[in-house]
Amino acid sequence: MDRYLLIVSTVCFLAAVVHTAIELRAGVFRPLRFNFFAVGLGFIFQTAFLSLRGHELERCPLTNLFEVFIFLAWSVAAIYMLVGPGYRLSLMGAFTAPLVVVLQVFALIAPIDIRHPVKLPANPWLEFHASISLLAYGAFALACIAGVMYLVQERQLKTHQLHSIFYHLPPLSDLFAAITRLLWWGFALYTLGIVSGFFTGHPLPRPQVVAAIGIWLLYAAILQGRHLRWFAPKRVAVLCIIGFSAALTLLWGITFTAEMHPIP
Amino acid sequence: MTVFCIGLSHHTANVATREQFAGSATAESIVREAGCPEALLLTTCNRVEVYGVSHKRISTDEIARCLTKTPIRDPHYYAPPFYRYEAEKCVQHLFRVASGLDSMVVGESEILGQAKKAYELARKSGAAGPYLHRLFQRAFRVAKQVRTHTDIARGAVSVGSVAVDLAQRIFGRLSDCKVLVLGAGEMSERTARALISRGVTDLRVTNRSMDRACELARAVGGRSIPFETWETQCREIDIFITSTTSETPLLTTEKLAPLLRDRLDHPLFIIDIAVPRDVDPSVNEMEGVYLYDIDSIRSVAEQSLELRRQQVVAAEAIIAEHVTDFVDSLSRGLNDAARKTEHPLPGENSLRASEL
């Protein structure tokens, strides 16, 4: 049953992707209502899925790679719902939806939904650590998407080749402001996630800790560079994409290691 | 009752021909002289058109005679450049005109305002009645829908508006932007005015001749600054408009690099409308600098026009839908009116019947 909810959710996000592709191709892109509605509906079904799975497991649904991917897709959609309309980044939905579709389709197709027999009671600190870290990943994903949008817009302005999408993307200054805010949100949540990891009462694998601190340092360096004006906005946008790619790789590694050596 | 349109436009007649028929007639005079119950005159720099409603056919020559400034003996003299649309074709033509599809610059919005003004004049004078009221109200609705649902009005097509459009794509709100105008030529003045109209409040003007700088600053509502300081101004300004007559580039990468060192996170938009160019093209390679010379601005304007042309198909589809619907509703209305005329209901007055 819960997998059907996920399939419906994926179809909603896919509808946003297809709608955007068709409209961009026809040169009549209207980013406002449809994308936000489709992403919103997809988000509702995601939430329903996670809620059902959580009740079934009697803990936060982060027990395997499948659930981690869905939680990450949910975080991305949740943060989009928070920042998208607020910063008038309506087109971000068009960029967010493909990422969510990729995450969910992969989770649905790959044989990663392996149920582990959980005997010990849930560890609240571990659940807090995992969920808050994934929310941070959601913010970093959105910063990465805003970075891609910044680079698309910047390239058009530099080369003087303006396509239909140019008139629908937010101004460079607004995109850069959104990137900065998302980085700060992500960094704050990630810091909280790392700190809470030390309260789980279980020894954490050293490679995971080192890699997580490495990602934290990378984002700290991006923010410091931004604050001290060492990096031009374009470089910050590129670093957001690199940072999220690294973070995603680390997430895979952490979850994979955790599945090998599960902590209750 | 048949609705018709007789007119001349930039497609069929040159300006010399058009001006022979513009300005002397009014909607009222056409109603009087041509003998049609309703008429509306739409006169712009690109067209002179009469929209009318009549039971009997009113000839093109008759309308041409009403429009002319000087009487010409040959009755067929006007016929060749005039076009004539009737019924469905007329409705379609008006919807296309109001939506800017028939304009010289496709998608321009000025025509809608002109059509509204023409309708208002005809309505006040009593020349436009219930038929033209319905027709024009629908035309305004169609024009709005076409603009909302397609990109027909997207992008700027003049130097000043392209500059403003690009500035808004870089900075968002322009009210906080600092603008420096170097050289007090006509093009810089137009661009500066366009920026002021979009909310720029901090505009600095400099020129080799201080008097000319002061004059331009006064004219556009900016302030003049000494010519020697323009380079150091680049440290803090956001938009730089230059149009001097210098034979060599005034701004090069070497000159600009040290000035931008402290403002790495702050873009600089340069509009170089001078020929020969005032800014070395390699400046565009610098991070955070967006340089547009006159050719690139023209190329953006061309791209916008092309984008608008691509939207014509989508716009025509919207118009076709409305034409069918409008013509159907009109014929339904006519049938109802005819029925009511034959068998009027008690208490129904003739005005209600005529309003369809």
Image (cartoon, coloured by chain):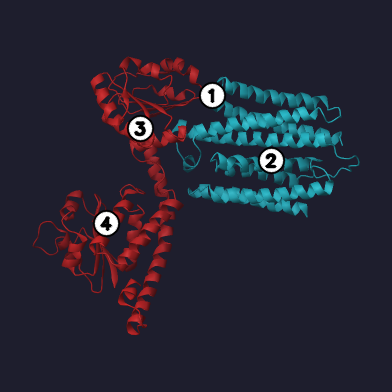
Residue pointed to by mark 1: A232
- The numbered mark, 2 or 1, whose residue comes first in the sequence reads 2
Instruction: Point out the frontmost of discs 4 and 3.
Output: 4
Is circle 4 on the same chain as circle 3? yes
The answer for how far apart the CA atoms under marks 2 and 1 are is 28 Å
Whether the residues at callouts 2 and 1 have beta carbons within 8 Å, the answer is: no
**Disc 4 residue crowd, few under 14, some 14–19, many 20+, Cα 10 Å:** some
- Looking at the colours in the rendered structure, which chain would you say is drawn in red? B
Q: In terms of sequence position, does the residue under pointer 4 or pointer 3 come before the other?
A: 4
Q: Which residue of the protein is positioned furthest toward the left in this rendering?
A: B73
Rounded to the nearest angstrom, the CA distance separating label 3 from label 1 is: 27 Å
Q: Which mark is residue B85?
A: none
Q: Are marks 4 and 1 on the same chain?
A: no
Q: Specify the colour of chain A.
A: cyan
At label 3, the amino acid type is Asp
Which element carries disc 4, helix, strand or loop? Answer: helix
Q: Identify residue for label 4.
A: B118
Q: Which one is in front in this view, the residue at disc 4 or the one at disc 1?
A: 4
The disc placed on residue A75 is 2
**Same subunit: marks 4 and 2:** no
